[in-house]
Amino acid sequence: MPLHVDQWFMPHPVAPMEDYPRPSDISRSEQKSGDPVTARHSINPPVVCNVMFAITDFTVENGATRLVPGSHRSGLHPVPDRDYGVFYAEVPAGSFVVWEGRTWHAASFNTADSPRVGITTYWSAPFIRQLLNFPLGLRPEVADALTEHERALMGFKTWEISTPRLPPRVVAVALRPSPGYGSAATSNSASCHAA
Ligand SMILES: O=C(O)CCC(=O)C(=O)O
Ligand SMILES: [Fe+2]
């Protein structure tokens, strides 16, 4: 897996007269890449955090997540196929690895003879759409069985952007998913919403 950032959807900041990317132009491959060195440009703040639970041990041999320390301060994306000084998150089963959404990282090659198993959870600011669209994709009976707090974490809540002092309201009724939506094929990641 190539190095990437999870907070890839944020457009890079621009100066007042500079051209800017339109929201529909934003894609993983269109982002500005460069070296994670002394940035003298403005950068976006973090709005995403990834927590990955290790079900098996993570080792260099079985493909432990590799991360580029300090890369979150660059506001840039890694140059494809370039070598960077990486740190391998080697942890025993039962641990979890946390990285900020702007950090350059990737799963590594598994050269061991057994799989590396982990669960990634993606925590985003509540005004950002989650990796998976749970209000649309979760089966209503599953959503109904959740507590109000759990539903809020899964994104079943409104966000008062224009009146931030009001508490967010939790949406109690699940929307009915369209047939086939939310199948395992859409993503291998779990996704959660920060309260
Ligand atoms: O499998 C890994 O170690 C990293 C997964 C990853 O990049 C992600 O969940 O965003
Ligand atoms: Fe990632």
Image: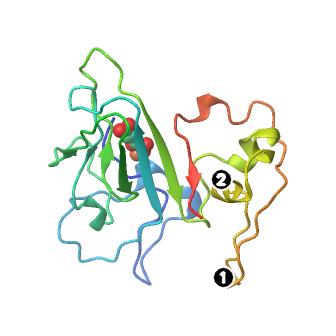
Q: Residue 55's spot in the image, x, y percent?
A: 41, 32
Picture residue at 67% right of the left edge, 48% below the top:
133
Q: Residue 111's spot in the image, x, y percent?
A: 24, 20
Q: Is mark 1 within 8 Å of ligand 1?
A: no
Residue under label 1 = 164
For the residue pair 57 and 113, the one nearer the viewer reads as 57
Give residue 76's quadrant in the image.
bottom left
Picture residue at 35% right of the left edge, 54% below the top:
99
Residue 177 seen in render: no
Quarter of the picture holding the N terminus: top left
Residue type at numbered disc 1: Pro
Numbered mark located on residue 154 in the image: 2
Picture residue at 30% right of the left edge, 40% below the top:
65
Q: Residue 92's spot in the image, x, y percent?
A: 29, 35
> Mark 1 to mark 2: distance in Å?
20 Å
In this rendering, position of residue 195 left or right of residue 122: right
In this rendering, position of residue 192 left or right of residue 69: right
Q: Is residue 44 above or below residue 94?
A: below
Quarter of the picture holding the C terminus: bottom right
Q: Which one is earlier in the sequence, the residue at label 1 or at label 2?
A: 2
Crowding at mark 1 (Cα within 10 Å: few <14, some 14-19, many 20+): few
In this rendering, position of residue 113 left or right of residue 153: left
Secondary-structure class at tag 2: loop
In this rendering, position of residue 29 left or right of residue 169: left
Crowding at mark 2 (Cα within 10 Å: few <14, some 14-19, many 20+): many
Residue furthest top as drawn: 113
Give residue 186's quadrant in the image.
top right
Picture residue at 57% right of the left edge, 51% below the top:
192
Count all numbered tags in the image, as a single digit. 2
Residue type at numbered disc 2: Met
